[in-house]
Image (cartoon, rainbow, N blue to C red):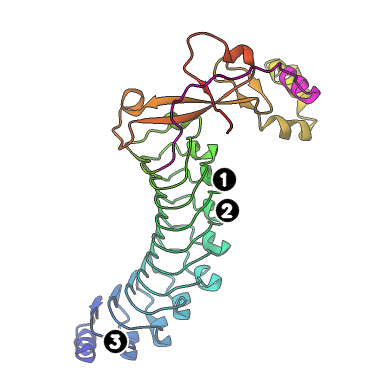
């Protein structure tokens, strides 16, 4: 049946060929003679490799290899440089060949759902045109920092893995609109996540989160899912207030950051790169809005998402991190910040 379909395609100089569900263990070599082919469907078969003859398919832009038996990326993919859409869902992939990834510079869509991937190679950043990357239901424990170089990425789906954290440069994915991290083991979301100002959908349901980044409300979210996390709850207890003892570094840093409003002082600071690096990690007090260096008091506010940003979420009130610079600010009236008790 497959050979007959290929023969018919050859006679018609076809641009599309569908060999899905034909119980194929190999792809007919004659497919490599379909030089005008731009779409090839090979899903739902028993394939574990592709013939080298397919390297002649210079016009191929879409290839579906879903639900087969591939354990690694076929080497012939190196030659399919016009490929824009690649499906490899429901295979047996354990690794991704860096040398193959480096040759897929025009890829826009990559589906790797339901495989056995435990890591991603740093060469993933070679997919410079990638807009959609889905890796649901793998065994990923982390994602490489270099993935965050994919400036055109719009959707990133990583549900049902074993991620414990995200790289801090996640904020470089400035075009990201959808981020799915549900059913992982993430304990803390980096503050840099809030740099994703184009983000519309954030799904972090079913993780180990207790609190959300301080600038969460600055995101223009339309959908937000955070159910089934051990989120902090408002439970008032008495605490003992301690006297503030600031380090010399902290006192100096606060003075410098206050003086940075002076142009001449700011010009002088540029000659001290180490000082600028240290000051670059400063925080802003949620009460007095002054800068300070080291985290003095971590607090939390409980935010009604519908009232604050107009979205409905399965969890209506969420805890959002806030940092305060002193007991003086903590004792100010009319703020809604609560200190986080350490068990």
Q: Is residue 66 magenta?
A: no
Residue range highlighted in magenta: 229-255
Residue contact between numbered discs 1 and 2, judged by CB atoms under 8 Å: yes
Estimate the spatial distance between the alpha carbons at disc 2 and disc 3, rounded to whole Å: 38 Å
Q: Quadrant of residue 23?
A: bottom left
Estimate the spatial distance between the alpha carbons at disc 1 and disc 2, rounded to whole Å: 7 Å
Could you tell which of marks 2 and 3 lies nearer the N-terminus? 3
Residue 146's place in the image compared with 67, above or below, is above
Q: Is residue 88 left or right of residue 128?
A: left
Could you tell which of marks 1 and 2 lies nearer the N-terminus? 2
In the rendered structure, find residue 26 and report the number of the disc placed on it. none
Along the viewing direction, whichever of 314 and 272 lies nearer the viewer: 314
Along the viewing direction, whichever of 28 and 58 lies nearer the viewer: 28
Q: Is residue 333 left or right of residue 65?
A: right
Residue at image location 58% in from the left, 15% down from the top: 330
Q: Secondary structure at mark 2?
A: helix
Q: Secondary structure at mark 3?
A: loop
Label 2 crowd bin: few (<14), some (14–19), many (20+), radius 10 Å: some
Could you tell which of marks 3 and 1 lies nearer the N-terminus? 3
Assign the magenta stretch its main secondary structure: loop
Along the viewing direction, whichever of 287 and 243 lies nearer the viewer: 243
Residue ID for mark 3: 24
Residue 234's place in the image compared with 2, above or below, is above
The image shows residue 219 at horizontal and vertical percentages of 42, 33
Label 3 crowd bin: few (<14), some (14–19), many (20+), radius 10 Å: some
Residue 105's place in the image compared with 14, above or below, is above
Q: Quadrant of residue 138?
A: bottom left
Residue ID for mark 2: 145
Estimate the spatial distance between the alpha carbons at disc 3 and disc 1, rounded to whole Å: 43 Å
Q: Quadrant of the N terminus?
A: bottom left
Residue ID for mark 1: 169
Residue at image location 70% in from the left, 20% down from the top: 257
């Amino acid at each position: 049946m497959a050979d007959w379909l290929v023969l018919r395609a050859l006679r018609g100089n076809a641009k599309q060929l569908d060999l899905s569900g034909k119980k194929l263990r190999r792809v007919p070599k004659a497919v490599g003679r379909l030089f005008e082919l731009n779409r090839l469907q090979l899903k739902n078969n028993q394939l574990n490799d592709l013939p080298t003859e397919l390297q002649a398919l210079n016009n191929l832009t879409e290839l579906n290899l879903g639900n087969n038996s591939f354990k690694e990326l076929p080497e012939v993919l190196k030659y399919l440089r016009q490929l824009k859409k690649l499906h490899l869902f429901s295979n047996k992939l354990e690794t991704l060949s860096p040398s193959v990834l480096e040759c897929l510079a025009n890829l826009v869509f990559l589906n790797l759902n339901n495989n056995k991937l435990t890591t991603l190679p740093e060469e993933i950043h070679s997919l410079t045109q990638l807009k959609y990357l889905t890796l649901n239901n793998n065994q990923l424990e982390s994602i490489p920092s270099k993935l965050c170089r994919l400036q055109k990425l719009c959707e990133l789906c990583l549900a049902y893995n074993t991620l414990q954290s995200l790289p801090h440069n996640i904020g470089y994915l400035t075009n990201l609109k959808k981020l799915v991290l549900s059913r992982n083991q993430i304990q803390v979301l980096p503050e840099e996540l809030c740099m994703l100002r184009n983000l519309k959908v954030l799904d972090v349901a079913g993780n180990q989160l207790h609190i959300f980044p301080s600038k969460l409300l600055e995101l223009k979210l339309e959908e937000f899912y955070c159910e089934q996390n051990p989120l902090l709850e408002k439970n008032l207890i008495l605490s003992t207030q301690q006297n503030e003892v600031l380090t010399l570094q902290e006192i100096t840093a606060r003075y410098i950051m206050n003086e940075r409003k002076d142009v001449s002082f700011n010009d002088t600071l540029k000659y001290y790169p180490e000082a600028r690096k240290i000051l670059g990690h400063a925080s802003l007090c949620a009460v007095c809005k002054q800068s300070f260096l080291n985290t003095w008091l971590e607090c939390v506010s409980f935010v009604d998402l519908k009232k604050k940003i107009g979205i409905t979420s399965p969890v209506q009130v969420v805890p959002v991190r806030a940092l305060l610079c002193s007991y003086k600010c903590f004792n100010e009236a009319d703020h809604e910040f609560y200190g986080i008790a350490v068990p």
